[in-house]
Amino acid sequence: MAAKLLRLTANVASSHLGIKATLRALRGDGSSMLLDSQAAGRSPAEADGLGGLEPPFLNIGDRLHCTLTNYTDDELFVRLICLDPRGKMLIPSFAVSPYASDGMMMPRQTLTIPRDDAPLPWAISAPNGAVEVCVLVSRTPFTQTNLLLGRSLRQAASPTSLALVPNPLEVAQALLGDLHQGGGAEDTWLLDVRSWASLSFSYRVV
């Protein structure tokens, strides 16, 4: 259910938020590989999208970098969430306390996650299988989500790349609550395509 709610936010084709996200892998042999590039609220020509192709294969130990470009005149807020082959929800360790520092994009600027000087890499790890990376960007902060993750991931600050989320459904509901524009019934969320973009990338661990 958490994965379903998270995937329902995907709106790269309809979002009016001007951003571009590119996911690259640094292979063990030192080569760099473009996994996918997607643009929301921009011309399709501005993305090097590889959508429709088979997810690329990566090896355990390869490292990921996500580059985000903010084309708007506003500060934007970022949240990364991964779904692993077991269906588990994970958060990159560099995106939770005490390493959290990449949650904001300045106007007309580019942000690379993780930073070159980040204390932890974003490394590919077991188990083998399909992995989904969800990149959510919003005009408003992920306040509920960050508070919830701060409480549930207190023990997650370890030298590993990904922290397991013990309460994925609550986190997915908090994400929707942060994107919610107010009004409507108690069990509904109203989202404005001008206010957020949710992009999905995938790869396979072999």
Image: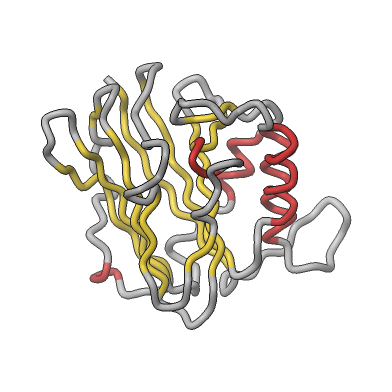
Instruction: State the image coordinates of residue 79 (x, y, percent, origin top left).
Output: 54, 51
In the displayed structure, 105 sits above or below 115; it is below
Q: In this view, does 51 lie to the left or right of 140?
A: left
Instruction: State the image coordinates of residue 63 (x, y, percent, origin top left).
Output: 29, 35
| Residue nearest the observer in this picture, 135 or 50 | 135
| Residue nearest the observer in this picture, 7 or 160 | 160
In the displayed structure, 32 sits above or below 107; it is above
Residue in view at x 59 percent, y 41 percent: 98
Display coloring: secondary structure
Residue in view at x 63 percent, y 30 percent: 165
In the displayed structure, 64 sits above or below 61; it is below
In the displayed structure, 50 sits above or below 82; it is below
Q: Give the tally of numbered discs.
A: 0
Q: In this view, does 9 lie to the left or right of 84?
A: right
| Residue nearest the observer in this picture, 120 or 34 | 120
Instruction: State the image coordinates of residue 179 (x, y, percent, origin top left).
Output: 67, 60
Residue in view at x 48 percent, y 83 percent: 73
Instruction: State the image coordinates of residue 118 (x, y, percent, origin top left).
Output: 40, 45
Residue in view at x 16 percent, y 43 percent: 32
Which image quadrant: the C terminus? Answer: top left
Q: Which residue lies furthest to the bottom in this view?
A: 73
Which image quadrant: the N terminus? Answer: top right
Q: Residue furthest right?
A: 186
